[in-house]
Image (spheres, coloured by chain):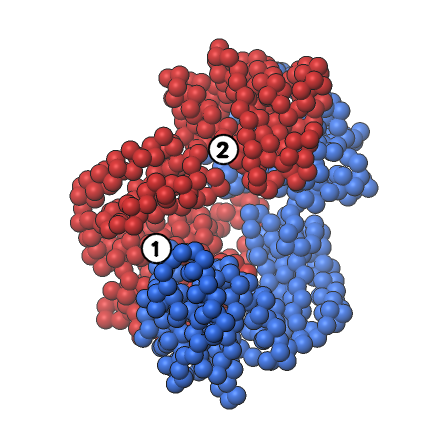
Chain colours: A blue, B red
């Protein structure tokens, strides 16, 4: 079973809007175990749409055509599909009634084009549109390619797909098999390194499949199993997860698409009743603002300091001027003092400090990307770690925050 | 001149990420007057990519292939293009040096796959990647279709396209007619309101065209003129800008795609030698971190406070306990005290404070989205403004920061 997605619309072709419909439908089909091997985008042009359909039906079992069902003159998708299949268009009377009523209610006059939205291909199945006027269409052909025609506006497409299309496809193709994904999240390893460690698994992937994805310093690994029920899928996923974690488990920090290091750390702090503060120089509040984004953080985070200038390090958290003078602000000693002092001032269990060079310019002879992160954890000796990032100002600051979160996470794991 | 865009990547094909690269390149080509009639999406599969290329080169003068240049084993785009054209891949020595140096600097080990990122098609032109390691490639063929190969990560693609590809395409295809855009930025007016004020202009747009774009609380308006040289284009833009600003100029704060409220505010502070600090509760450092993202801010920003808990408001910046007890932390009085005290402690010209309810839960009987922002400006009376946002936690925090920046901007404009 192989599907192909054709998006119709000059505004997509010219890049005025992103083709989010294609992503949505592709994810939906993948969830049904239907492979998508090709996507096309075509403008509002009947000849090129006909060519695209002709190409798609040769290589795919199901062609999804999206967009061009509306009431304007360049909305011609159904007409092109009908002509291509040598069928006529027929009226969905219920949909037409809805259109007529809608125009009466809103006091606007009904044009001929508006009525076209109630048409569907003869022999097909009209798909009701809960969020708009244009009906969709599913055309099942015994020994030839099937066609699914969907409206372009995302609100209409998404609702129609979830509500009507998924049950029809399950029923038509007797789909029992389903895809189940598990997302594993890693920090401290690059995407290339991670892929290298899993080289053979990625090369020979069948079921589950493995896909890596890197974003702003984190890497995720998505395992996807194809199975007839959840139990079988979970067993496949468990086995693959074990193989993967034996190799790269030391970088693993959590599960799920809707997760991140800050969420994991804040939830660990809450679970262990550990309070935290921070003294931030180059990150200028980004660490605190990041943990501040997690609901519930107020029970473990009273507040902290942004000590951007050397004077603020001295005045706000009493880092001795002699330490700054002797070692500089970008130093192990300053990072240690910053963590130690802020912990003392806010009576917390943990304090973290950031001092370094965000860039673009160097500071005290240290190149942009040099960062010291200090960590004070309960009564343990205060430590500081040195990092060398080589990115732009924003990424250097963001990587500092992520590494800070990871230090806290590891400290909690080690001590609990 | 007709172009076609092929995006390569299983994650796009399966809908795990949106194909924003296609939109970006399509808009860029449109700006050069190059028509895009087809887009395709293909997974990381060499055979299907080869088929897609074969189809595209038959019907297009320029084929843009995006993605699959990275260091993992499924990144095969350049190999497929080279084989399709019967050419070999050669090394861009400068790019290879950059890769080797990067790995040395960051202390990681260099694999064979990493080196592949410095390859380009023999006879083509290697395109430097300022934001990554993989070079792009432009292959101009005298009597046959041209190929442009671009990296998949949007940061890399966008920079390479703007910096290198546009000049090369202009030069290669002798493009004189050009689109010139001017971006006007507004804060304090919604996109729908802005569009309503410019209704007739948007309906009758020809040259310049107008497009509105809303993002995270700001609205931008892009005017685009089509003219044979900059002088004519500028005259068209000047005239339209005047018409627009007569209607909505009171919300205008700056020009340019690469601009934002924080940049405008920090540059105003620097220009007027005004120093600033902040005391943040619900925003938890987001205001300070946002101004901290602007290079040069260190001359006007010594640091500040994150006073998340009531105790921190009292202990760190000495907001009297009686004020907190009598009025609550979400109050005009607390906001005023927070601004006043932090200004005094850091001896700055300006201080801003944020206290309120980010959500999802209410606080002290105030619904999520209730925010007080205090402003202390030199010796002016300290004031506080009340806001009611109705968004989720992150957006409520972000809108607070934007409104804080706007308060500072307006205060500087009023006083200077």
Looking at the image, residue A182 sits to the left or right of residue B409; the answer is right
Query: Of the residues under marks 1 and 2, which one precedes in the sequence?
Result: 1
Residue that protrudes farthest toward the right in the picture: A416
Q: Nearer the viewer, residue B103 or A353?
A: A353
Q: Could you tell me if residue B303 is visible in this image?
A: no
- The local secondary structure at tag 1 comes to helix
Asked if residue A175 is positioned above or below residue A390 in the image, the reply reads below
The image position of residue A242, as x and y in percent, is: 74, 62
- Using the numbered discs, state the Cα–Cα distance from disc 1 to disc 2 in whole angstroms: 29 Å
- The local secondary structure at tag 2 comes to helix
- Residue B402's tag is 2
Asked if residue B74 is positioned above or below residue B259 in the image, the reply reads below
Looking at the image, residue A40 sits to the left or right of residue B179; the answer is right
Asked if residue B171 is positioned above or below residue A367 in the image, the reply reads below
The image position of residue B346, as x and y in percent, is: 56, 16
Q: Could you tell me if residue A159 is visible in this image?
A: yes
Instruction: List the residue tagged with mark 1.
Output: B27
Residue in the image at 66% along x and 24% along y: B329
Q: Nearer the viewer, residue B11 or A81?
A: A81
The image position of residue B94, as x and y in percent, is: 39, 51
- Residues marked 1 and 2 touching at CB (< 8 Å): no
- For label 2, the crowd category at 10 Å Cα-Cα, with few meaning under 14, some 14 to 19 and many 20 or more, is many
The image quarter containing residue A108 is bottom left
The image position of residue B355, as x and y in percent, is: 61, 27
């Amino acid at each position: 079973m192989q599907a192909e997605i054709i998006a119709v619309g000059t505004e997509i072709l010219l890049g005025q809007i992103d083709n989010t419909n294609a992503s949505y439908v592709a994810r939906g089909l993948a969830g049904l175990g239907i492979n998508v091997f090709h996507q096309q985008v075509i403008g509002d042009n009947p000849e090129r749409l006909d060519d695209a359909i002709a190409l798609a039906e040769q290589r795919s079992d199901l062609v999804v055509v999206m967009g061009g069902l509306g009431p304007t003159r360049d909305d011609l998708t159904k007409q092109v599909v009908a002509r291509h299949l040598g069928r006529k268009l027929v009226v969905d009377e219920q949909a037409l009634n809805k259109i007529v009523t809608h125009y009466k209610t809103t006091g606007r006059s009904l044009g001929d084009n508006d009525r076209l939205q109630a048409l569907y291909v003869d022999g097909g199945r009209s798909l009701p549109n809960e969020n708009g006027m244009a009906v969709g269409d599913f055309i099942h052909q015994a020994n030839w390619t099937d066609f699914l025609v969907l409206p372009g506006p995302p609100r209409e497409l998404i609702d129609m797909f979830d509500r009507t299309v998924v049950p029809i496809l399950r029923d038509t193709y007797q789909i029992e098999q389903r895809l189940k994904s598990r997302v594993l999240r890693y920090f401290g390893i690059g995407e290339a390194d991670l892929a290298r460690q899993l080289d053979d698994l990625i090369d020979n992937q069948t079921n589950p499949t493995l896909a890596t994805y890197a974003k702003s310093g984190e890497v995720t690994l998505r395992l996807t199993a194809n199975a007839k029920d959840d139990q079988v899928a979970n067993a496949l996923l468990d086995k693959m997860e074990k193989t993967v974690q034996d190799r790269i488990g030391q970088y693993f920090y959590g599960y799920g698409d809707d997760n991140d290091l800050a969420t994991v750390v804040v939830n660990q702090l809450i679970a262990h009743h550990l309070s935290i503060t921070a003294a931030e120089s180059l990150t200028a509040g980004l660490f605190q603002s990041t943990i501040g984004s997690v609901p519930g953080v107020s029970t473990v985070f009273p507040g902290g300091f942004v000590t951007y200038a050397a004077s603020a390090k001295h005045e706000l958290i009493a880092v001795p001027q002699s330490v700054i003078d002797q070692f500089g602000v970008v130093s192990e000693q300053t990072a240690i003092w910053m963590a130690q002092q802020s912990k003392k001032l806010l009576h917390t269990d943990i304090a973290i400090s950031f001092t370094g060079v965000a860039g673009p310019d160097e500071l005290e002879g240290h190149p942009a990307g040099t960062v010291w992160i200090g960590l004070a954890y309960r009564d343990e000796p205060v430590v500081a770690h040195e990092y060398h990032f080589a990115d732009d100002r924003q990424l250097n600051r963001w990587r500092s925050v992520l590494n800070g979160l990871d230090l806290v996470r590891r400290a909690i794991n080690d001590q609990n």
